[in-house]
Image (spheres, rainbow, N blue to C red):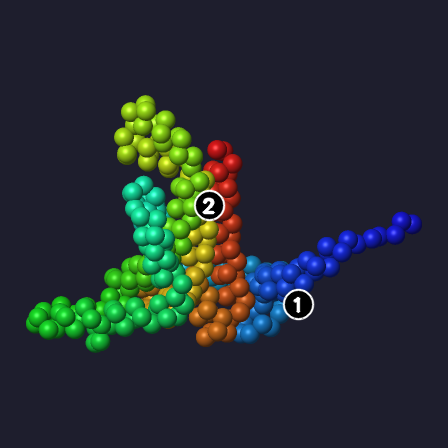
Amino acid sequence: MPKIQFSAAYWFILPAMLFFILLAIYPSAFVLFLSFFATGKGIAVSANHPSFANFLDVWKNVNFGKFMLQTFIYAGGATLLHALLGFIFALILNILPLNPVFTRTMRTVFLIPWAITPTVVAILFRILLSPQVGPISIYLKSIGSPIVFGPLGQPEWALLAVTLTNVWMFTPFYMLMILSAMQAIDPGIYEAAVVDGANGPQQIFFITIPMIKNTLLTLGMFDFVTTAGYFDLTWIMTQGGPVKSSEIISTWVYRTAFQSFEFGEASAIGMILFSISVIVSIIVLRAINKE
Protein backbone atom coordinates (compact mmCIF):
# COMPACT_ATOMS: atom_id res chain seq x y z
CA MET A 1 0.00 0.00 0.00
CA PRO A 2 1.53 3.33 -1.03
CA LYS A 3 2.49 5.65 1.78
CA ILE A 4 0.72 8.99 1.84
CA GLN A 5 3.14 11.89 2.01
CA PHE A 6 2.20 15.44 2.93
CA SER A 7 4.08 18.41 1.60
CA ALA A 8 5.47 20.84 4.16
CA ALA A 9 3.23 23.50 2.60
CA TYR A 10 0.14 21.82 4.08
CA TRP A 11 1.46 22.37 7.58
CA PHE A 12 1.85 26.08 6.90
CA ILE A 13 -1.74 26.50 5.68
CA LEU A 14 -3.18 24.24 8.41
CA PRO A 15 -3.59 27.05 11.02
CA ALA A 16 -5.44 29.22 8.49
CA MET A 17 -7.69 26.31 7.52
CA LEU A 18 -8.50 25.53 11.16
CA PHE A 19 -9.21 29.21 11.78
CA PHE A 20 -11.57 29.30 8.77
CA ILE A 21 -13.34 26.11 9.82
CA LEU A 22 -13.87 27.29 13.41
CA LEU A 23 -15.03 30.82 12.54
CA ALA A 24 -16.86 30.26 9.25
CA ILE A 25 -17.72 26.66 8.38
CA TYR A 26 -18.77 25.47 11.84
CA PRO A 27 -20.98 28.50 12.73
CA SER A 28 -22.65 28.36 9.30
CA ALA A 29 -23.34 24.65 9.61
CA PHE A 30 -24.68 25.14 13.15
CA VAL A 31 -27.04 27.90 12.02
CA LEU A 32 -28.31 25.65 9.22
CA PHE A 33 -28.81 22.85 11.74
CA LEU A 34 -30.72 25.12 14.15
CA SER A 35 -32.97 26.45 11.37
CA PHE A 36 -34.32 22.93 10.79
CA PHE A 37 -34.13 21.30 14.22
CA ALA A 38 -34.35 23.98 16.95
CA THR A 39 -37.77 24.52 18.51
CA GLY A 40 -39.11 27.07 20.98
CA LYS A 41 -36.82 29.14 23.15
CA GLY A 42 -33.07 28.65 23.23
CA ILE A 43 -31.33 25.97 21.19
CA ALA A 44 -33.50 23.04 22.26
CA VAL A 45 -33.32 20.53 19.43
CA SER A 46 -36.22 18.41 18.24
CA ALA A 47 -35.51 14.73 17.83
CA ASN A 48 -37.80 14.56 14.83
CA HIS A 49 -36.71 14.68 11.23
CA PRO A 50 -35.82 18.07 9.70
CA SER A 51 -38.75 20.46 9.84
CA PHE A 52 -39.62 23.63 7.96
CA ALA A 53 -41.61 24.93 10.94
CA ASN A 54 -39.18 27.76 11.64
CA PHE A 55 -39.25 28.89 8.01
CA LEU A 56 -43.06 28.76 8.02
CA ASP A 57 -43.15 30.86 11.20
CA VAL A 58 -40.94 33.45 9.55
CA TRP A 59 -43.10 33.43 6.42
CA LYS A 60 -46.27 33.87 8.47
CA ASN A 61 -44.85 36.82 10.41
CA VAL A 62 -46.97 39.86 9.60
CA ASN A 63 -43.83 41.99 9.23
CA PHE A 64 -41.94 39.61 6.94
CA GLY A 65 -42.77 41.49 3.73
CA LYS A 66 -42.10 44.86 5.32
CA PHE A 67 -38.69 43.88 6.66
CA MET A 68 -37.71 42.29 3.35
CA LEU A 69 -38.72 45.42 1.43
CA GLN A 70 -36.85 47.68 3.84
CA THR A 71 -33.76 45.48 3.51
CA PHE A 72 -33.86 45.74 -0.28
CA ILE A 73 -34.40 49.50 -0.09
CA TYR A 74 -31.51 49.89 2.35
CA ALA A 75 -29.07 47.57 0.58
CA GLY A 76 -30.14 48.47 -2.96
CA GLY A 77 -30.19 52.21 -2.32
CA ALA A 78 -26.81 52.17 -0.59
CA THR A 79 -25.29 50.05 -3.37
CA LEU A 80 -26.52 52.38 -6.11
CA LEU A 81 -25.28 55.48 -4.29
CA HIS A 82 -21.94 53.85 -3.47
CA ALA A 83 -21.43 53.03 -7.15
CA LEU A 84 -22.66 56.38 -8.49
CA LEU A 85 -20.79 58.63 -6.05
CA GLY A 86 -17.72 56.40 -6.06
CA PHE A 87 -17.65 56.54 -9.87
CA ILE A 88 -18.04 60.33 -9.94
CA PHE A 89 -15.30 60.97 -7.37
CA ALA A 90 -12.98 58.46 -9.04
CA LEU A 91 -13.62 60.05 -12.42
CA ILE A 92 -12.80 63.51 -11.07
CA LEU A 93 -9.51 62.32 -9.59
CA ASN A 94 -8.65 60.35 -12.72
CA ILE A 95 -9.39 62.76 -15.57
CA LEU A 96 -8.70 66.21 -14.14
CA PRO A 97 -5.12 67.49 -14.58
CA LEU A 98 -4.56 67.69 -10.85
CA ASN A 99 -1.25 67.91 -9.06
CA PRO A 100 -0.12 64.37 -8.06
CA VAL A 101 0.45 65.49 -4.47
CA PHE A 102 -3.06 66.94 -4.33
CA THR A 103 -4.50 63.73 -5.80
CA ARG A 104 -2.77 61.57 -3.19
CA THR A 105 -3.90 63.93 -0.44
CA MET A 106 -7.51 63.79 -1.60
CA ARG A 107 -7.40 59.98 -1.70
CA THR A 108 -6.37 60.01 1.94
CA VAL A 109 -9.05 62.56 2.88
CA PHE A 110 -11.75 60.57 1.08
CA LEU A 111 -10.77 57.42 2.98
CA ILE A 112 -11.20 58.98 6.43
CA PRO A 113 -14.94 58.11 6.78
CA TRP A 114 -14.24 54.49 5.83
CA ALA A 115 -11.41 54.26 8.36
CA ILE A 116 -13.59 55.34 11.29
CA THR A 117 -15.09 52.60 13.45
CA PRO A 118 -18.78 51.97 12.58
CA THR A 119 -19.79 52.46 16.21
CA VAL A 120 -18.19 55.90 16.24
CA VAL A 121 -19.88 56.80 12.95
CA ALA A 122 -23.27 55.71 14.26
CA ILE A 123 -22.92 57.71 17.49
CA LEU A 124 -21.62 60.72 15.55
CA PHE A 125 -24.64 60.79 13.25
CA ARG A 126 -27.02 60.20 16.15
CA ILE A 127 -25.67 63.40 17.63
CA LEU A 128 -25.70 65.30 14.33
CA LEU A 129 -29.30 64.26 13.63
CA SER A 130 -30.53 64.71 17.21
CA PRO A 131 -33.51 67.08 17.64
CA GLN A 132 -32.03 68.31 20.96
CA VAL A 133 -28.27 68.74 20.47
CA GLY A 134 -27.80 68.35 16.71
CA PRO A 135 -26.25 71.38 14.97
CA ILE A 136 -29.06 71.52 12.39
CA SER A 137 -31.72 71.53 15.11
CA ILE A 138 -29.84 74.16 17.10
CA TYR A 139 -29.59 76.39 14.01
CA LEU A 140 -33.30 76.00 13.23
CA LYS A 141 -34.16 76.94 16.80
CA SER A 142 -31.84 79.95 16.67
CA ILE A 143 -33.70 81.42 13.69
CA GLY A 144 -37.08 80.71 15.26
CA SER A 145 -38.08 77.97 12.82
CA PRO A 146 -40.98 75.73 13.93
CA ILE A 147 -39.44 72.77 12.09
CA VAL A 148 -38.33 69.93 14.37
CA PHE A 149 -35.36 68.23 12.72
CA GLY A 150 -35.06 64.67 13.99
CA PRO A 151 -35.09 62.15 11.12
CA LEU A 152 -34.09 59.20 13.30
CA GLY A 153 -37.29 59.64 15.30
CA GLN A 154 -39.56 59.98 12.27
CA PRO A 155 -40.79 56.74 10.63
CA GLU A 156 -40.77 58.23 7.14
CA TRP A 157 -37.13 59.39 7.37
CA ALA A 158 -35.34 56.94 9.67
CA LEU A 159 -34.42 54.36 7.04
CA LEU A 160 -33.23 57.07 4.65
CA ALA A 161 -31.06 58.60 7.39
CA VAL A 162 -29.41 55.25 8.13
CA THR A 163 -28.92 54.58 4.40
CA LEU A 164 -27.23 57.94 3.83
CA THR A 165 -25.00 57.35 6.85
CA ASN A 166 -23.94 54.06 5.31
CA VAL A 167 -23.28 55.85 2.02
CA TRP A 168 -21.14 58.49 3.76
CA MET A 169 -19.07 55.83 5.48
CA PHE A 170 -18.48 53.29 2.70
CA THR A 171 -18.43 55.33 -0.53
CA PRO A 172 -14.66 56.06 -0.14
CA PHE A 173 -13.84 52.35 -0.32
CA TYR A 174 -15.74 51.90 -3.59
CA MET A 175 -14.29 55.14 -4.95
CA LEU A 176 -10.79 53.76 -4.36
CA MET A 177 -11.62 50.44 -6.06
CA ILE A 178 -13.17 52.15 -9.08
CA LEU A 179 -10.27 54.60 -9.31
CA SER A 180 -7.83 51.68 -9.39
CA ALA A 181 -9.81 50.08 -12.23
CA MET A 182 -9.85 53.36 -14.18
CA GLN A 183 -6.11 53.84 -13.82
CA ALA A 184 -5.54 50.33 -15.18
CA ILE A 185 -7.07 51.31 -18.55
CA ASP A 186 -4.48 51.80 -21.27
CA PRO A 187 -4.17 55.58 -21.96
CA GLY A 188 -3.60 54.74 -25.61
CA ILE A 189 -7.26 53.81 -25.96
CA TYR A 190 -8.30 57.33 -24.98
CA GLU A 191 -5.70 58.83 -27.30
CA ALA A 192 -7.07 56.81 -30.21
CA ALA A 193 -10.60 57.87 -29.29
CA VAL A 194 -9.58 61.55 -29.31
CA VAL A 195 -8.05 61.10 -32.77
CA ASP A 196 -11.36 59.61 -33.92
CA GLY A 197 -13.18 62.67 -32.58
CA ALA A 198 -14.69 61.28 -29.37
CA ASN A 199 -15.52 63.92 -26.79
CA GLY A 200 -15.39 63.57 -22.99
CA PRO A 201 -18.86 62.07 -22.38
CA GLN A 202 -18.40 59.64 -25.28
CA GLN A 203 -15.10 58.46 -23.81
CA ILE A 204 -16.78 57.89 -20.46
CA PHE A 205 -19.79 55.97 -21.81
CA PHE A 206 -18.05 54.01 -24.57
CA ILE A 207 -14.60 53.41 -23.08
CA THR A 208 -14.43 53.92 -19.32
CA ILE A 209 -17.68 52.25 -18.28
CA PRO A 210 -17.37 49.21 -20.62
CA MET A 211 -13.74 48.70 -19.57
CA ILE A 212 -14.55 48.66 -15.84
CA LYS A 213 -17.97 47.00 -16.16
CA ASN A 214 -16.87 43.75 -14.54
CA THR A 215 -15.31 45.68 -11.66
CA LEU A 216 -18.55 47.59 -11.14
CA LEU A 217 -20.60 44.38 -11.21
CA THR A 218 -18.28 42.65 -8.76
CA LEU A 219 -18.30 45.61 -6.40
CA GLY A 220 -22.09 45.85 -6.70
CA MET A 221 -22.52 42.19 -5.80
CA PHE A 222 -20.15 42.46 -2.84
CA ASP A 223 -21.76 45.73 -1.74
CA PHE A 224 -25.35 44.48 -1.83
CA VAL A 225 -24.56 41.24 -0.01
CA THR A 226 -22.53 42.90 2.75
CA THR A 227 -24.91 45.85 3.18
CA ALA A 228 -27.98 43.58 3.38
CA GLY A 229 -26.36 41.80 6.32
CA TYR A 230 -24.81 44.88 7.89
CA PHE A 231 -25.93 45.36 11.46
CA ASP A 232 -23.88 47.97 13.32
CA LEU A 233 -25.13 51.28 11.95
CA THR A 234 -28.82 50.43 11.93
CA TRP A 235 -28.88 48.97 15.42
CA ILE A 236 -26.87 51.71 17.09
CA MET A 237 -28.69 54.55 15.31
CA THR A 238 -32.32 53.37 15.51
CA GLN A 239 -32.51 49.77 16.79
CA GLY A 240 -34.94 49.21 13.93
CA GLY A 241 -37.29 51.97 15.04
CA PRO A 242 -39.28 54.04 15.26
CA VAL A 243 -42.22 51.59 14.97
CA LYS A 244 -39.99 49.19 13.00
CA SER A 245 -39.63 51.68 10.13
CA SER A 246 -35.89 50.96 9.81
CA GLU A 247 -35.94 47.29 10.80
CA ILE A 248 -33.97 45.17 8.33
CA ILE A 249 -33.22 41.46 8.26
CA SER A 250 -29.97 41.73 10.21
CA THR A 251 -31.57 43.63 13.10
CA TRP A 252 -34.58 41.29 12.96
CA VAL A 253 -32.25 38.31 13.35
CA TYR A 254 -30.56 39.92 16.36
CA ARG A 255 -33.87 40.83 17.98
CA THR A 256 -35.30 37.35 17.42
CA ALA A 257 -32.20 35.54 18.70
CA PHE A 258 -30.98 37.68 21.59
CA GLN A 259 -34.15 39.37 22.80
CA SER A 260 -36.79 36.73 22.11
CA PHE A 261 -34.27 33.83 22.39
CA GLU A 262 -35.91 32.03 19.47
CA PHE A 263 -32.69 30.79 17.93
CA GLY A 264 -34.37 28.38 15.53
CA GLU A 265 -36.49 31.11 13.96
CA ALA A 266 -33.54 33.53 13.94
CA SER A 267 -31.45 30.90 12.14
CA ALA A 268 -34.21 30.48 9.57
CA ILE A 269 -34.23 34.24 8.95
CA GLY A 270 -30.46 34.14 8.56
CA MET A 271 -30.71 31.31 6.03
CA ILE A 272 -33.26 33.31 4.03
CA LEU A 273 -30.82 36.22 3.93
CA PHE A 274 -28.06 33.83 2.91
CA SER A 275 -30.25 32.46 0.10
CA ILE A 276 -30.92 35.98 -1.19
CA SER A 277 -27.19 36.69 -1.18
CA VAL A 278 -26.48 33.50 -3.12
CA ILE A 279 -29.14 34.32 -5.73
CA VAL A 280 -27.79 37.85 -6.22
CA SER A 281 -24.24 36.49 -6.50
CA ILE A 282 -25.25 33.90 -9.12
CA ILE A 283 -27.04 36.54 -11.23
CA VAL A 284 -24.06 38.90 -11.14
CA LEU A 285 -21.49 36.15 -11.83
CA ARG A 286 -23.48 34.97 -14.84
CA ALA A 287 -23.59 38.52 -16.14
CA ILE A 288 -19.81 38.75 -15.74
CA ASN A 289 -19.22 35.41 -17.47
CA LYS A 290 -21.21 36.56 -20.49
CA GLU A 291 -18.63 39.26 -21.13
Instruction: Pick whichever of labels 2 and 1 is earlier in the sequence.
Output: 1
Horizontal side, residue 290 vs residue 97: left or right: right
Which is in the foreground here, disc 2 or disc 1? 2
Quadrant position of residue 239: bottom left
Extreme residue toward the left, this view: 144
Residue to which mark 2 is pinned: 218
Question: Residue 101: horizontal and vertical position, in percent?
Answer: 34, 52
Name which residue lies at 32% across and 24% down: 195
Quadrant position of residue 42: bottom right
Question: Residue 246: horizontal and vertical position, in percent?
Answer: 33, 63
Please name whichever residue, 105 or 239, is drawn nearer the observer in this view of the structure.
105
Q: Amino acid at mark 1?
A: Ala
Question: Residue 63: horizontal and vertical position, in percent?
Answer: 38, 62
Residue to which mark 1 is pinned: 47
Q: Amino acid at mark 2?
A: Thr
Q: Secondary structure at mark 2?
A: helix
Question: Residue 145: horizontal and vertical position, in percent?
Answer: 9, 69
Please name whichever residue, 68 or 130, is drawn nearer the observer in this view of the structure.
130
Q: Secondary structure at mark 1?
A: loop
Structural crowding at the residue carrying mark 1, measured as other residues with C-alpha within 10 Å and reported as few (<14), some (14–19) or many (≥20) = few
Quadrant position of residue 140: bottom left
